[in-house]
Image (cartoon, grey):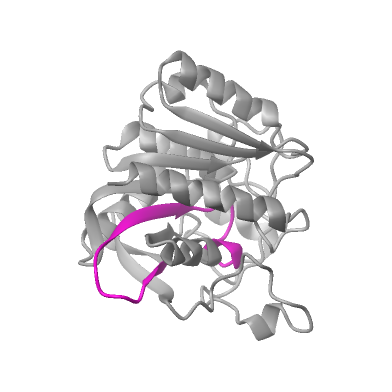
Amino acid sequence: MCLDDDCNNELNDRRSFLRGVTATVASLTVLSRRDIHAQTPAPPTRVLDDPKIQHGRVVFKHNGADSIDGFLARPKAEGVYPAVLVIAGNKITEEYIPNTCAALAVAGFVGLAPNVFHPLPDDAPRNEYDKYLGKHTESDVLDDIQSGASYLRSQTFVSPGGMGIVGFCFGGRMAMLFAARSREIDAVVPFHPGVMKAPELKRLVVPVQIHHGTADKAVSVTESQNVERILKGQHTPVELFTYEGADHGFLAYTRPFYKPEYAQLAWTRVTQFLRKNLK
């Protein structure tokens, strides 16, 4: 399956989905505005410095013994909040993933991005990525996501009600696969998701909101249109929003195809959808 930085319509072999990663490998600590945005204004969708939220790295149990890391953001105010998993299409150290968690916190949710790329050491050279990631299958990633969901359920600041899941590219595909297999999830938001087949969607019954650019060169918008058709055919609540002329990664201000006006519009739709479905 394709990754966020290495996606095309021909990469459908699940066991080789982690080949060709090109993300920058760094520590999980979120880079400061000084590091990333020196000399330039902060993108309008960047909210990591919002004083009403708190965020940082967390570590939790994985398969009962081993630990897995992730990035968590939540409102500072006391209370309980609905939880939303964020599934990246690449290393979660790229700032737009922590920022997505932070944006969820600004909107009144707890956002957690489990590190589904944890087998890759931070200092692994590019030519050794396959050695670490080649055997980390989609089933393994689903286990990673479940560990994140279980961790969220154990937190006193997380509401016992519905949980959502948001994913990007490969992560969008995994978000739908997880929602089709888990009773934890009550709403799914995939952005330009990887290719899905009808049998994989058969058990997906919770509401789905898909976002896709019409000029996406990595994953054709026709793939999301096909998912919409399949889900409607099986009476799964679904809505597809397309963004004229937008390419892959239009939500991510760290990417060359970032479209701030579309990013803000899409995010408004996402938060409204999650509030409606996470009771």
Q: Quadrant of residue 74?
A: bottom left
* Residue 115 seen in the current view: yes
Count of numbered circles on the image: 0
**Residue drawn at x 48%, y 59% as measured from the top left:** 119
Is residue 141 visible to the viewer in this orientation of the structure? Answer: no
Confirm whether the magenta stretch covers residue 87.
Answer: yes
Residue 266 x/y as whole percent? 59, 48
Q: Position of residue 252 (x, y in %)?
A: 65, 58
> Percent x, y for residue 138?
46, 40
**Above or below: residue 59 compared with residue 188:** below
Determine whether, in the image, residue 33 is placed left or right of residue 110.
Answer: right
**Chain part drawn in magenta:** 72-97
Q: Identify the image quadrant of the N terminus.
A: top right
Q: Position of residue 265 (x, y in %)?
A: 62, 50
Identified at 66% across, 33% down, the residue is 11
Hey, which quadrant is residue 142 in on the image?
top left
Q: Is residue 180 left or right of residue 258?
A: left
At horizontal 46% and vertical 81% (from top left) the residue drawn is 51
Q: Residue furthest top?
A: 233
Q: Is residue 126 magenta?
A: no
**Foreground residue, 174 or 278?**
278
